[in-house]
Image (cartoon, rainbow, N blue to C red):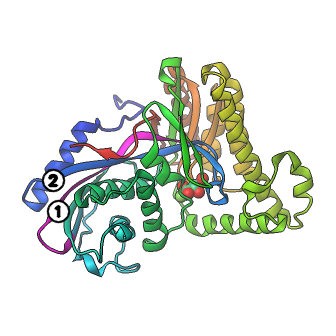
Amino acid sequence: DTTPLLSAAPERSAAAERAAQLFEESFGYAPDGVWSAPGRVNIIGEHVDYQDGLCLPMAISHRCFAAAARTPTSRLRLRSAQDDLVLDLDASALEPGAVEGWPAYVAGVLWALRPFISGAVTQGMDIMIDGQVPLGAGLSSSAALECAAAEAIEALLTLGTTPLDRVRAAITAETDFAGASTGGLDQSASVLSREGHALFLDCRDFSTRAVPWDLASQGLALLITDTRAEHSHVDGEYTARRADSERAAEALGVPTLRDADPSQLDELLGRIDDEVVRRRARHVITEIQRVRDVDALLASGTVRAHVSEIGALLNASHDSLRGDYEVTVPQLDLAVDTARAAGAHGARMTGGGFGGSTIALVEADAAAQVAEQIAAAFAEAGFSAPQFFLALPSEGAGQDR
Ligand code: GAF
């Protein structure tokens, strides 16, 4: 077997070229340009964005590409290299519920950007999507799709939006047009991340700061394990967790759990009667503090200088998501436990949970061996074979050609 255990993302300029070619083959003329946006992993700060929390995500090297052109019509025509589903509708007919499947994430962005378009949306455009972010892996393929679309639409229509406007349009597309729930972590990471850096994100106002996260030069690596576990009941469970956290904030008399003082944790938790809601609150409040702790460590030195403390915080994050927030599944726990036993400095699930991926902070020269041990543990447990990637901190959304 010569298949490398760690799969690499397609090289960016070659992938952009491919998207342009696919556009031309499909629509019969060359696109005006190609834009792309990356998927993400969240290093820490999980299930806190919808409580005004703090997160530390980074963009990965897998991206979604959008080759696009303005047309002299009013039709919005969408096609994809990954799916036979197409969209061809009058741009002025865009409204929530009018579009289904993946095209809703693109059409929804155009709809969400209408405050920046004088009058109704009447400009037609053709868009070819080539999504290279693994689907269903919890690596934010939908946010990458929305954010690539937002870049393309901004450029085609010269709307004058800021990157943050595009983050907000992508969030609105997902929540109000596609009808999925999101707290904004994924879209912020996809648009605002900088190469070689993690993104310190304050979800209260979506302000950000780039934090050096150049593991390769420090002999370290962040190993992504896509568990390939079937996502089941994700939407319902996600909504339920959000509701629990809102109940917790209400019980504490604060607008969001961001306003709860972690130094008063025991006293605060004592004010919540419901045992489940109390555990949900404990996760969110302690997780926000863990992001502050990692950020403080990174402000005072490199990842290498604090690798065991950062690893311990990643471990504590996972344990809290497993025990208190209950969003893990056996595959996530096995990948994390195996990575730790194989010598990872720390490991945790990343993203919404209920399937998806884990990350492990490892010595670079041990990454392949940690992956092998996870693969062996999965085979032994009878789980689907996982897929492995290295999380290389990449540049946020932008134009490719
Ligand atoms: C999903 C959501 F889309 C994000 O907004 C965030 O809540 C995440 O789960 C959990 O941190 O990816």
Residue type marked 2 = Asp
Q: What percent of the width, then of the height, locates residue 213?
A: 53, 29
Q: Quadrant of ligand 1?
A: bottom right
Residue 304 makes an appearance in the image: yes
Tag of residue 32: 2
Q: Residues within 10 Å of mark 1 (few under 14, many from 20)?
A: some
106 in relation to 401, above or below: below
Q: What percent of the width, then of the height, locates residue 359?
A: 56, 38
Tag of residue 70: 1
Nearest to N terminus: mark 2 or mark 1: 2
Residue 354 makes an appearance in the image: no
Q: Does the segment drawn in magenta span residue 67?
A: yes
397 in relation to 204, above or below: above
Q: Quadrant of the C terminus?
A: top left
Q: Is disc 2 placed on a helix, strand or loop?
A: loop
Q: Are marks 2 and 1 in contact (CB under 8 Å)?
A: yes
Left or right: where 353 falls relative to 291: left
Q: Which portion, as a residue range, is magenta?
A: 57-76
